[in-house]
Amino acid sequence: MNPALRTSALALSLALTGCATTNPKDPFENYNRAMFTFNDAVDRAALKPAAEGYAKLPSFVQTGVSNFFGNLGDVWTAINNFLQGKAGDGMSDVMRVAVNTTMGLGGVLDIGSEAGLTKHKEDFGQTLGKWGVKSGPYVVLPLLGPSTLRDTVALPLDYQADPWYYVSPISVRNSGSVLRAIDQRAAILDASNLLEEAALDRYVFVRDAYLQRRESKVHDGAVPESHYEDDVGPTLTEDDASGAQQKSATLNDQPATSAEPIAKPVVEVEQNGAGKPEAASPGKEIRQ
């Protein structure tokens, strides 16, 4: 798809602020739902049937197509890793491209993974997120599907940085782009079928899953710092719990200095039938 069309999709979504809702993470929900319905209709009518037919091809054919376009994507991934300051991952991506292109028949064979070179997937939207740019509102783009304001702004650069963008003649480029889209759709056939059967509101499910996944990818899988302790106070860490257990064991092992028997410290409370803790009686160890 032409980058200008992608930019137009952003302009369209921003122009429809009159259809906004009060949801802070989805202010364009009314428009987004309409576009989600449109994209779903296109998928059911064309893309999904094509993917189901493609999935019947021999697995080595599908793997070869996926590897070929994945190798092209590794070029932009490497650049984004360098832009994010992840030099080690960037060098690994460069090595993957070199090995797969030369020894893997132009990328049809994934020799890099066999050699222990981890495959990454980075785009400029993730790079902007790494630089501190907020994701902005959730946006559903025509045909392209879920996105955010930040990721939509980054799309034209992602598109032009793809080596396949410069393949000629145009007929070959367009045919390859369609094949790539069908291959990517076939890869998620089982997941989409499960979603259709399980989700009560597929729009909400897809939106929340996309936003969580993008947040995870921006932070390389690390969960952003939570403000939970600001609300309820500090929680007991594993080290704190271990120290408390050792201290309790030490107290229990100390000899009694009185003639009267000393009950062990109560560290566990048994729940009575009403859900309230029972009082500890002397000499009785209460267990859960």
Image (spheres, rainbow, N blue to C red):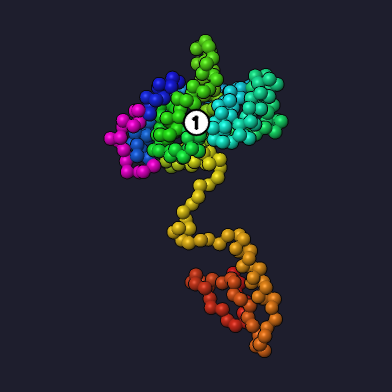
Image quadrant occupied by the N terminus: top left
Image quadrant occupied by the C terminus: bottom right
Residue at the extreme bottom: 259
Locate residue 39: give its quadrant.
top left
Q: Which residue carries the number 1 mark?
A: 124
Asked whether 89 or 28 is in front, the reply is 89
Asked whether 238 or 44 is in front, the reply is 238
Q: Residue at x 67, y 85 (%)?
A: 257
How many marks the image carries: the answer is 1
Q: Magenta includes 22? A: yes
Q: Residue at x 61, y 22 (%)?
A: 68
Asked whether 244 or 278 is in front, the reply is 244
Question: Is residue 18 rendered to the left or right of residue 137?
Answer: left
Residues drawn in magenta: 11-25
Residue 223: x and y in percent read 53, 47
Question: Is residue 191 rendered to the left or right of residue 7?
Answer: right
Q: Identity of the amino acid at label 1? A: Phe
In this view, 97 is above or below 283: above
In this view, 227 is above or below 107: below
Q: Work out whether residue 207 can be spotted.
A: no
Question: Is residue 166 rendered to the left or right of residue 87?
Answer: left
In this view, 201 is above or below 161: below
Residue 225: x and y in percent read 50, 50
Instruction: Classify mark 1: residues with Cα within 10 Å, few (<14), some (14-19) or many (20+).
Output: many
Residue 137: x and y in percent read 39, 38
Residue 229: x and y in percent read 48, 58
